[in-house]
């Protein structure tokens, strides 16, 4: 299977987290559940291929969709929104390519999140991903799907950051924990759309700039 690395810029992670938190803590006027609603957006960046066949995604820009239909257990994109936003951004920032879609998974409790492995993409996420022609076309058949999961921590536990899997990175902000999961789509030898799945060694999320890596110390 091809190998992929995902680089998320700090400003992208900030924008994702702000939207995920607003949707989680405040929700939507029509959806007043404990875990708020899911949010949805479009992600642009650049893609490079190294000589040894490694594809590196540098994802840098997020635009949250204000016409996606948000609910507490799903979010439905407006198909017109991605085309419109991409046409506008191509005029303003032609060096950026629409490479990924983003949504959030809000969970009311740690227990339910753990029970259902809430940071995984759902079967419906994968069906939508394989069918969404826009991202396959703009990304030259290499789209990325990102999900950010959030849960409020009930007890004071060990805080930190790291990987649950190579493609799942987690970090804490005060009493909230976040996981970012990434999946990459590609064409197989028959030209059929495939994806790397929830459990893979083909996709690595690089460490986020503001989180600690093991053994790091500030000197001086
Ligand atoms: Zn999902």
Image (cartoon, grey):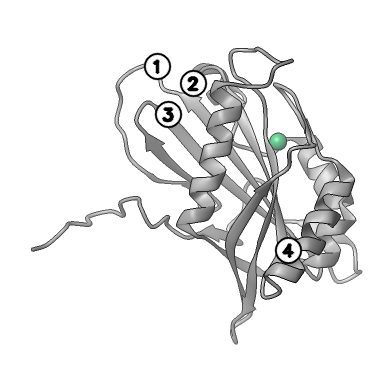
- Residue under label 3: 176
Tag 3's secondary structure?
A: strand
Q: Which residue is mark 2?
A: 110
Above/below status of 194 relative to 151: below
Cβ of mark 1 under 8 Å from ligand 1: the answer is: no
Residue 38 relative to residue 124: left or right: left
**SS type, badge 1:** loop
Residue 147 picture location, percent across and down: 63, 42
Marks 3/2 in contact by CB < 8 Å: the verdict is no
Can residue 90 be seen? Answer: yes
| Residue at 47%, 60% in the rendered image | 206
- Which callout, 3 or 4, points at the residue further toward the start of the chain? 4
Q: Quadrant of residue 58?
A: bottom right
Q: Mark 1 sits on what residue?
A: 154
**Who comes first in sequence, dot 3 or dot 1?**
1
Q: Earlier in the sequence, mark 1 or mark 2?
A: 2
- Quadrant of the image for the N terminus? bottom right
Residue on which disc 4 sits: 89
Residue in the image at 58% along x and 23% along y: 107
Whole-number angstrom distance, CA of label 3 to CA of label 2? 10 Å
Ligand 1: image quarter:
top right
Q: CA distance from mark 3 to mark 4?
A: 32 Å
Mark 3 vs mark 2: which is more N-terminal? Answer: 2
Q: Choose between 137 and 60: the one closer to the eye.
A: 60
Q: Residues within 10 Å of mark 3 (few under 14, many from 20)?
A: some
Nearer to the camera, 25 or 88: 88
What residue is at 63 percent from the left and 22 percent from the top? 27
On the question of residue 1 being in view, the answer is no
- State the CA–CA distance, disc 1 to disc 4: 41 Å
């Amino acid at each position: 299977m091809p190998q992929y690395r995902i680089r998320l810029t700090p400003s992208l992670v900030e924008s994702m987290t702000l939207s995920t938190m607003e949707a989680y803590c405040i929700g939507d006027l029509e959806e007043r559940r404990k875990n708020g609603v899911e949010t949805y957006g479009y992600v642009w960046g650049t893609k490079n291929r190294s000589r040894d066949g490694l594809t590196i995604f540098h994802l840098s820009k997020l635009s949250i969709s204000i016409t996606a239909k948000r609910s507490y257990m799903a979010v439905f994109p407006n198909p017109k929104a991605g085309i419109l936003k991409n046409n506008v951004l191509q005029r303003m920032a032609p060096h950026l390519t629409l490479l990924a879609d983003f949504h959030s998974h809000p969970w009311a409790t740690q227990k339910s999140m753990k029970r259902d492995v809430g940071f995984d993409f759902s079967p419906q996420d994968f069906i939508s991903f394989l069918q969404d022609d826009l991202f396959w076309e703009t990304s030259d058949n290499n789209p990325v799907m990102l999900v950010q999961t959030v849960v409020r921590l009930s007890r004071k536990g060990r805080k930190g950051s790291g990987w649950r899997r190579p493609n799942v990175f987690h970090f804490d902000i005060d009493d909230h924990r976040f996981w970012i999961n990434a999946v990459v789509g590609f064409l197989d030898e028959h030209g059929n759309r495939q994806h790397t799945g929830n459990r893979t060694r083909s996709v690595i999320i690089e460490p986020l700039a503001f989180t600690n890596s093991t053994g790091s110390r500030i000197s001086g």
